[in-house]
Amino acid sequence: MKPEHFPKEIQAHLIPEQNGKLIYRCLGCGAEHSIEKLLYTCPGCGAVLLIYDENFDRLKEIPGETWHQIFDYRKMLTIPALKGIYRYHEFIGPVIPTDAIVYLGEGHTPVVEGNGIMQEKAGLRFYFKNDGQNPSASFKDRGMASALSYINYLVKSGMISDVLAICASTGDTSAAAALYAAYLKPHIKSAVLLPHKKVTPQQLGQPLGSGASVFEIPGVFDDCMKVVEHLADNYNVALLNSKNAWRILGQESYSYEVAQDFEYDMADKVVVVPIGNAGNITAVMSGFLKFYETGIISALPKVIGVQSEHANPVYKYYLEPDPAKREFVPMTVSPSVAQAAMIGNPVSMPRVIRLAEQYNRTAGGQRVFFISVTEQEIMDWELTANRNGHIACTHGGESLAGLVRALKLGYVDKDDVAVVDSTAHALKFAGFQQMYFENSFPPEFGVTPKPELVNAPTLMRPADLERVPEPGNPLGEADFKKFVRRVSDEIAATLKLTSLK
Ligand SMILES: *Cc1c(COP(=O)(O)O)cnc(C)c1O
Ligand SMILES: [Zn+2]
């Protein structure tokens, strides 16, 4: 639909203007810095930054109801720049001109309700939001669309040139970074650092396929992150990790979509996300707060952050009920099937502390909870979900396991409705499913397959057949007929099919 076909009162708002006034604000010393330079940490004190809009109050002048209409009508536009996360332009990057926005199909991922069997097993109504249906098959595309649109804007306006975008990754960040950078060739090139043998073959193949320079580093993600930080501090590179506050802005789109998916009614809703480097949960809390402050939603949903007990420093931090006594202790991680969240020293921890406090204070009571689950629970819930029509990755399984535990702990009510983040596509982590099915998990994972969840292919090679088809060596007609009949009969017997004759 063309803008001139929309109602007059909406037309004025349909195409966003660039009238935000964004600044970086340091979470350590409170200093403010201009966004005209790419900054990742405060030049004064070294703490992480968040981006704030000094003109944010202008958004409160538009009534919540009008915002609903703006976002709902924008759905019908065919302008690529506004088809993805920038449907919420005013909240994500209100300085970026639409012609600098990079759209590769990210955002607006489906919400799929659990079927009756699943809801009974879980104990409440829930939906998966399939963020694995983003272009590089994880939610990381949301933040990357934002960071690369901003960099593209700087390139187009002549403020920077010949950018080398760099990141450390547990797999999905590098896949997303390499994809978006490849699209912006030749102005932007990318290099990614991965922990050697700690990403799946699919995740390694993605940045290779996008043409990035790929480096494998001994150790785990936390070690890669240190190298990337050293590079960013000492060389002319653009850091694309979630330390980069532009990533957080883009990932806020997840909350905006959940709000729109549920017609802006967030009462009795629970949003469940896995936590690794803690950028995602930061963005989710920040996004809901912004929609709440502008009257777009009138309740803040509960937010549940889930970690594996093999990498749960955030959960441990919040075990201490007295905020004054809490102390963050980085941990050494053990192998986890939620491999993209295998992080012992999350970069965004100061952001989580700040936003969880603000979220609970704004809601007038505790609305943010942290849960730890076992590797066994993660696998069992992932496989159970996928046997019921979902495409959850291990982190989706982790989120669902966390929701079930939160219900048992009383953080969630059985009448609440939950939105569970499946942060990547099941196929990226198919190797863990295979280990489960073949009972080949290394002992440190602590996963024992449940027989009812195991599946394996059956080779149909009837022993009485002398010859079966082989590539380049076809059977004669009689042999082939016999082959088809015998194999069909065996399949029918195995499946106990009833004959039509
Ligand atoms: C990155 C990632 C996470 C963890 O998100 P953070 O923002 O690092 O907390 C979870 N699941 C998947 C699939 C990821 O790629
Ligand atoms: Zn500072």
Image: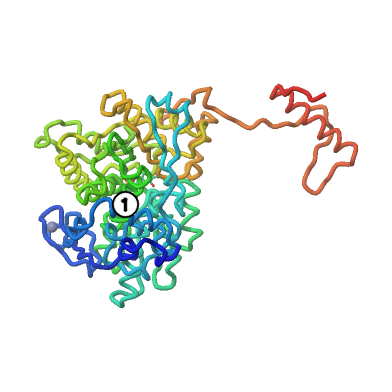
**Residue hosting label 1:** 68
Residue 485, picture quadrant: top right
For ligand 1, tell me if the residue under mark 1 lies within 8 Å: no
Q: Which amino acid does label 1 sit on?
A: His
- Residue 333: image location, x then y, percent: 31, 38
For the N terminus, the quadrant is: bottom left
Q: Is residue 103 left or right of residue 286?
A: right
Closer to us: 354 or 10: 10
Closer to us: 225 or 80: 80
Above or below residue 9? Residue 464 is above
Residue 308, picture quadrant: top left
- Residue 436: image location, x then y, percent: 50, 31
Above or below residue 154? Residue 137 is above
For the C terminus, the quadrant is: top right
Q: In this view, does 367 lie to the left or right of 490?
A: left
- Residue 311: image location, x then y, percent: 31, 37
Is disc 1 placed on a helix, strand or loop?
helix
